[in-house]
Image (cartoon, rainbow, N blue to C red):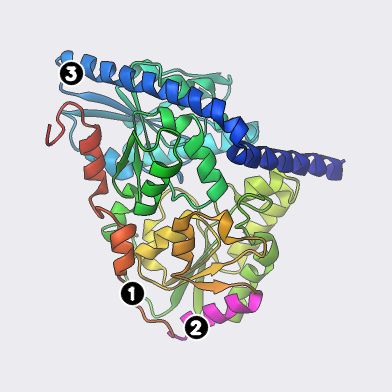
Amino acid sequence: MVDLQSKKKKDKIIKGTKKLIHRVLDPSMSIARTCEIRVKARKAEAHYDEVINKIKASGRTRLKFAAYVIFDSTYGMDGVFKLMMKDPEHWNPVIVVIPDVARGSDHAARTYKKTKEYFVNRYGQEHVIDGWDADRNEYYDHIDEFDIVYYANPYDNMVHKYHKICYAYKKNVLPIYVSYGYDVGRFTTLSRLRGKELNLVWKLFADTTYTYKDYLKYQTIKGKNVVLAGYSKMDDLCSCDDGDSMQSNRKKILISAHHTVSMETLPLSNFLKYNDLILELPVMFPDVDFVFRPHPLLFTTLVNEGIWTQEEVAYYTKVIEDRGIEYSTGGDYLGLFRKCDAIVNDCGSFTVEWLYTGKPGCFVYNDKLKREHLTTLMNKAIERYTVARSRQDIIEFVKSVAENNHVESRGMSRWVKDNIALNYPRVSEYILNEINILNKVGQ
């Protein structure tokens, strides 16, 4: 029975992948869809002008802002939110926690609870409200309570109707999108740029020069609602406090594994190939400390696709900790970036984000991965890494870090500064000014 269920899940994934590729690449399919989105976008643009005029005419000096968030780790507005909290005269910010409805009720309840706890601890109970009652399975519609809503999730198929961008754009609210991670997959990026969600928001903020060019070239409305701002998520890197300022003579290496274990359009993950090696590294290198931080969807994907059971996941994470490997989860990882000396990873956004540190990195290349699977940004980022294509390559990289064979500049390269770290470390201030319709500098 388990094998049959696993086969059904894999068949569904393959079918969905083929459908995605067909929708992105088939010209005959895209013409009608493109026309529909452009018409809606023009209406949305006019509607947003009306919304802004009404807010300005109200005489109010304080804007009501909400961030609709599913996962604490896929949230790109922390810096902006903190600036709003410091200015209560002009901003009333809240987090609306919403569930992921696409991966089963157990996953939804577990992640919802975790996300809510994270934000209550981070911002205080007064800044967090529920978008869902898990016990009653009741979804809450708060959209009319706000002036501006940030959507941390650009995929409407993951959320309830009340939490969709395509629900908000007809309301008296200004929806925005700030990326929680860099665009690294070509097919997924094209699908997102040609889909309804990011063509219907009031404003979306491009994080790199490469991303901005992609919007201008591939987005259905050709960048009309796009602002080149930079990546606000990294603003705190230069000042974050990881709570461990003591320097250690031991090297610390971050290992991060992606969730795309069976994704044909973006075959990044090597976890099924190298999960045993992760457990062996502390034995091979007893003088090195290791931190394992999987993508938040890795183990959920393994269970939902019938590859591992929940018991196998629990056993693996226990062995991880028994081997002395730090098991990292949760939304805040910039402190981890500060205290680690190197990274071994096959992830998307982490590959670009790590470049801010100037520290050595090893990108583990999947045998099925090709350049055409990736965006220009991701291909350019990988060029800055040591590339591993085998178990021995990974071991050699770890050995080189342990033996201090890397030049540790601990600073950004000129390429990163010019193309990636735009407006760093004041991206949050830039975005806040762009959305502050009542007091925008330069108006």
Indicate whether 80 appears above or below 273.
above
Front residue (pair 338, 350): 350
Give the residue at mark 3: 56
Query: How far apart, in angstroms, are the residues tagged by discs 2 and 3?
Result: 59 Å
Residue 336 showing in the rendered view: no
Q: Quadrant of residue 116?
A: top left
Q: Are marks 1 and 3 in contact (CB under 8 Å)?
A: no
Q: Quadrant of residue 236?
A: bottom left
Q: Nearer the viewer, mark 1 or mark 2?
A: 2
Give the residue at mark 1: 247
Residue 195, disc: none
Residue 273 image offset from top left, x and y in percent: 69, 65
Closer to the chain start, of discs 2 and 3, is 3
Q: Residue at x 57, y 30 (%)?
A: 157
Query: How far apart, in angstroms, are the residues tagged by discs 1 and 2?
Result: 20 Å
Indicate whether 416 appears above or below 59.
below
Magenta span main SS: helix
**Disc 2 residue crowd, few under 14, some 14–19, many 20+, Cα 10 Å:** few
